[in-house]
Amino acid sequence: MTTTTNPIKSEEIIFYIDLTSDFIKKGTLMDTIQEFIEDKLSLGDSSFGMVIFQENDNPISLYDNKESSTILHNIEDKWDTRPKNQSYIENGLFEILSYIFRKSREIKKVYRVIVLSDTPSIKTEEYHTALYDLIIKSKNLDFITIIDIIRVGESPQYEDEVKLKVITSETNGGLFWCSNTQQLKDVLNSLIKSKIEFNIIRPGEDQKQYLEEDKIFYERLAVDLISLSSGDEEKCSICQLELCPICGAYSDEIHKCFNCGSKFHGCCSARFAIMNNFGYNHIFRCPQCETLLKLDEDYVNLVYDEDFKSPKIMEVQEAPLIKENENYQQIYEMEPKPLEMVEKMHEIEKEQYSKGIVNEQFEAENQSELEESIEEKFKKIEAISSFPSPPSLKNEEVVLRPPSLKTIELPPSPPKSKKVRVGGYFGQEIVVDDKLKSAKLKIKDLPEVPTFEEKKSITQLRPPKKRTTIKFCKICGCSVTNVICCPNCGANIE
């Protein structure tokens, strides 16, 4: 599966204030955050957010804002009503990740979460497991979430340090400890530079684990394509055509994205989703507005099986190649040798002619082949044996040709004989010698072979073809066929 590799330029930084003590004063915190926002805006276009919990366990949140005054006003207004007895770090990260998942439907960007905490969490293990599951799901999506945690206080170690390190390591963030205000400013200044500029090692598609139970989660994030309105132009945004060029079917209706109105054929959107997915073939982003969309999974899988699966390669057994040091003469050597074949054939034919028996091989051939002399056959064999030997290999001796054939005396010509077939071509064949001038042979009447008339099926019968009728014009005498008026004079043809 392939994934989209478009660079992510937009960045949103969210501050989560989980401070229960007065180790960091409100004024110092506001000045540090204001300085961070101003320095960040001077480097590029970024947006900011803020989350802080209240004593009644309700979070106060502000997202996607580009003015530092709004962020500072919320901190000023909600600072005194914050909880002062326990940490809500898991709850705050749940709130921020929920916003990130909702926002990811509409746009793909980098989300950076900076957590300011001074108290260890006392939540149960179930809270941390649920939070870790959300973090893993965010890693499989095509946006980037980076969580940096800054722990402020006098103690360098806390009970939940292992849990925090797991969270930061999974999101390519960092865990920092600050014992005074100056260290806090230094850490925030180090986080000003965008982490997109660094080569963040992310797992490849073959290393990611897409579980079946997670598919429901991603499907709920995505949105289906909607039908066209009455005034919409029926033109696909991918192929720029009204009729689908892939299937050519008018039944392939065009649907559109609910956010930007981009229109897609069913075939075009399925192939685009397969080539630009992030783990599931039927979930993809709109190429125009980057909204998270989804298609019918069964239809997309059918398209994937037909067009994108590699065909099975048939195994072909190749002929064995000649080894480098293999003897060429042994490969081309024929068994039995030509001389032995000639001598053996000569002995067999001589024995047959001496007994007056005609070889079965000669009986099966035509009459012209029967009259071919043995001498011509010997010439053919000698011509075959005189063919050039195969070329020699490198660093090998030239293969010698077989010795020429010796002259063999021809056997005496056999007595002249005639073949006669009694009863026609399929009758019995007898050999008549010159000495046997007359021979009487009784021929028995052959039994009559009954004939059966083949029954023809009515489906095999064809109606007779209609013959064309030639007519003559009564006015000009022109011959015409299959016309009402004469093409020559225009008279009616009856």
Image: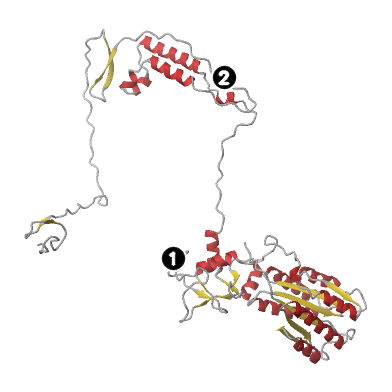
Can you say which quadrant of the picture contains the N terminus?
A: bottom right
337, 299: nearer the viewer:
337
Mark 2 or mark 1, earlier in chain: 1
Furthest-right residue in this view = 154
Q: Secondary structure at mark 2?
A: loop
Kindly identify the residue that appears in the image at 21 percent across and 53 percent down.
463
Q: Position of residue 358 (x, y in %)?
A: 35, 16
Q: Secondary structure at mark 1?
A: loop
Q: Amino acid at mark 1?
A: Gly
Q: Position of residue 351 (x, y in %)?
A: 41, 11
Could you tell me if residue 180 is visible in this image? yes
Q: Amino acid at mark 2?
A: Leu
Q: Which mark is residue 400?
A: 2
Furthest-left residue in this view = 474
Cα distance in 3D space between marks 2 and 1:
68 Å
Kindly identify the residue that appears in the image at 82 percent across and 75 percent down.
149
Direction from residue 327 to residue 455 in the image, left or right: left
Question: How is colour applied across the structure in the image?
Answer: secondary structure
Q: Is residue 232 above or below residue 279?
A: below
State the image quarter where residue 284 is shown: bottom right
**Which residue in the protein does label 1 denote?**
248
Direction from residue 275 to residue 455 in the image, left or right: left
